[in-house]
Image (cartoon, grey):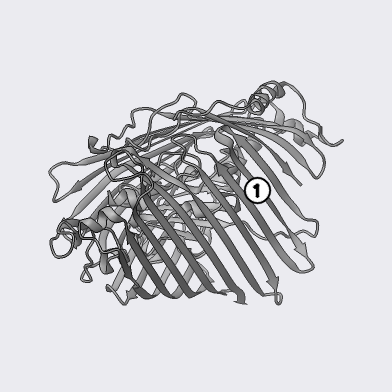
Amino acid sequence: MERLFFHKCRAVTRCTSRIYFFVLLLLLLPGFSSAQPPDASSSSGNRIASSHTTKDELLLFWDEKDLYVQSATRHEKPISQAAENITVITAKEIEEMNAHTVAEVLNRISGVFVDFSGHDFGSSSLLHIQGSEERHVLVMLDGIAWNAMNSGSAETITIPVRIIDRIEVIKGPASSAWGSSLGGVVNIITKNTGDARNPSGTLSASYGEARSQDESAEVSGKAGPVGYYLFAGRQESKGLRDDRDFRSYSLFSKVKIPLSKDVALGVAAGYSEPKGTLAVLPSYDLLNRGLFRAFFGTASLDAAISPELKLNVQFNTFKQKFNLNNSVLGMGLMGAAGDLYQDSVYDEKTTGVSGRLVWTRGAHTAVFGAEYSHGTLEQVLTAGPLLQSIGVPETMRTDPSINKWAVYANDTITFGRFTITPGIRHDHNNITGSFTSPSLGATYKLAEKTILRASVARGFTIPPLAFTSGGGLFLDPNPSLRPEKVWSYQGGVESGVCDYLWLKAAVFYHDMRDAIVPVAFGGGPPAYNDIFINEGKIRRQGVEVEAETVPVYNLSLKAGFAYVQKKPSLAPDTVVNYAYNIGIKYDDRKSFMAQLFGHYVWWGMSDVLQAKYDAFIWDLNIRKRIYSTEKTETELFLTGHNIFSGSQYTIGDVKNPGRWVEAGLRFKF
């Protein structure tokens, strides 16, 4: 029940006439030629539109496989030099899948298991990586930790997906670079400011069943020497199932001011306010609604002190507020309809500063950094008449705070075909004390397109403040809780086994100690309160395999498989999770793109919550450019969600919608 209150927010309505219009239009348009500027028939354009795959296209494909990433060591380097298991999702991919939330994007990554609260429009979600708990996954946005201090998990519906330039996911502990991140890191990097005096941007609007709408506008450019990026967005739905309505407003802005040739100041700020019905729970006679607010701001200074030495300093502030309201549905189990069951307000604020020096010379790229942050959390729980009748106080209030500092260092050393990355970080906070996280990784270039990877790392996650200071329903505090810790071992290979096929495989073994588990505790009202303690060990091990083909006749295939075996020492059985991702894409890279993506996940849960996840969920995305000039383009897009109406949910009361359709228009300038 506690999980429902903190994390879980009839049939799908028939499509409106405008949806059918869009569907018909998109099906007819592939045979038409989109309007082009006079020079659109250049040799380059003809090559791209040709039916076969050229040598240049193969080189482009493999160049994209050698992406640069910054999450492994907190400084940009080729992914071929990263020993960690990293997946990158770009803004282009996000646009092609017409994602409305970060969780929808992450759901397509092998090894990332997303537990949706119904998979409705704007659904709340929990993130797991390689069998981890949700509190073990650290979500970062431009250097700001997004995880809630109360629960330890991150609510990503407060992050507008349109502002994202790229998402880098480290699967496995990344504590030597990022601190408290036993399960992995989701590092979200927002779009850059513009570098041209003529502004460019995108206007987008979509409409779907249950009045599901998503409108956004973004523009970037330069005003004098100052670069800027501006965004505004709105989402709304009446609820695709069980009247789970949703509404969200969001704003974001970023400017970059050059102070000199080698020094630049960056300032960014954003605000988001999603709200709606999180879950309708007839089995518990409860209606769960939520209001979320997030504000963040950063000010950063980048300076090239010398050709070999670069400095970054960042100040940030982050405010989150969660208001979770549970009221009685009126089915006779909990009382009269509309009665308050519990209202929970979590209001938190974090301010921090960080600094990073990057020294590059010869074979070395060394990073030295330090961080400090101060966080406060105000928790107010109001109990309704039913809870008060069993001994719960009408109001419970706690005001914990946490101070954290850390220093870290790592080096990327390249010689010949080898790259070695040693790293270490020391974290301290005023609640659980100190923790040191070493790591060592290596890559070896076996052939021109084949990389071997191996890493060993020690990681940790600090307990959420609700566990140490209270603040949850039927939950007593345990200030003696220690961080959960893990030793992790991973190995893998990434290869272009031939010109037309890319393969990636990884194996992992995580040996976790001091696992935090709940136990019954009779020390306070009511008598069946729980308390969390450090007890037991958990072994997580498994494998990931991914494959992707080069486009041949404009058609490409993509597939992924992840298998996790989780064995808690205090449990008699081993829990198995696995997931399949399958995608097929047609893209003429001129005017038409269509992709079909399927996802299957096995949660290995007991049937206590009447979960069901025995089917693939298939989504269809179609995009057609209908008009373009030298500086603008206009395209129609269509998404068919869950086109075969499969069932995939972890709580019987919060089922996912069946098939639903949306269509929209996107204008770029």
Q: Is residue 280 above or below residue 416?
A: above
Q: Secondary structure at mark 1?
A: strand
Task: Say whether residue 396 is left or right of residue 350.
Answer: left
Q: Nearer the viewer, residue 412 or 548?
A: 548
**Residue at horizontal 30%, vertical 47%?**
131
Q: Is residue 53 visible?
A: yes
Extreme front residue here?
336
Q: Nearer the viewer, residue 571 or 87?
A: 571
Q: Is residue 84 visible?
A: no
Q: Sort mark 1 into few (<14), some (14-19) or many (20+) by Cα contacts within 10 Å.
A: many
Residue 311 placed where, x, y %? 56, 75
Q: Quadrant of residue 422?
A: bottom left
- The kind of residue on which mark 1 rests is Ser
**Residue at horizontal 64%, vertical 62%?**
253
Q: Quadrant of residue 631?
A: top right
Q: Is residue 120 above or below residue 527?
A: above
Extreme right residue here?
38
Residue 101 placed where, x, y %? 51, 46
Task: Say whether residue 499 is left or right of residue 49.
Answer: left
**Residue at horizontal 54%, vertical 73%?**
314
**Residue at horizontal 36%, vertical 42%?**
329
Residue 175 placed where, x, y %? 36, 64
The mark tally for this picture is 1
Q: Nearer the viewer, residue 330 or 20?
A: 330
Q: Nearer the viewer, residue 659 or 448?
A: 659
Q: Is residue 345 above or below residue 309?
A: above
Residue 270 placed where, x, y %? 58, 62
Q: Is residue 580 above or below residue 568?
A: above
Give the residue number, with chain letter if any, for mark 1. 216
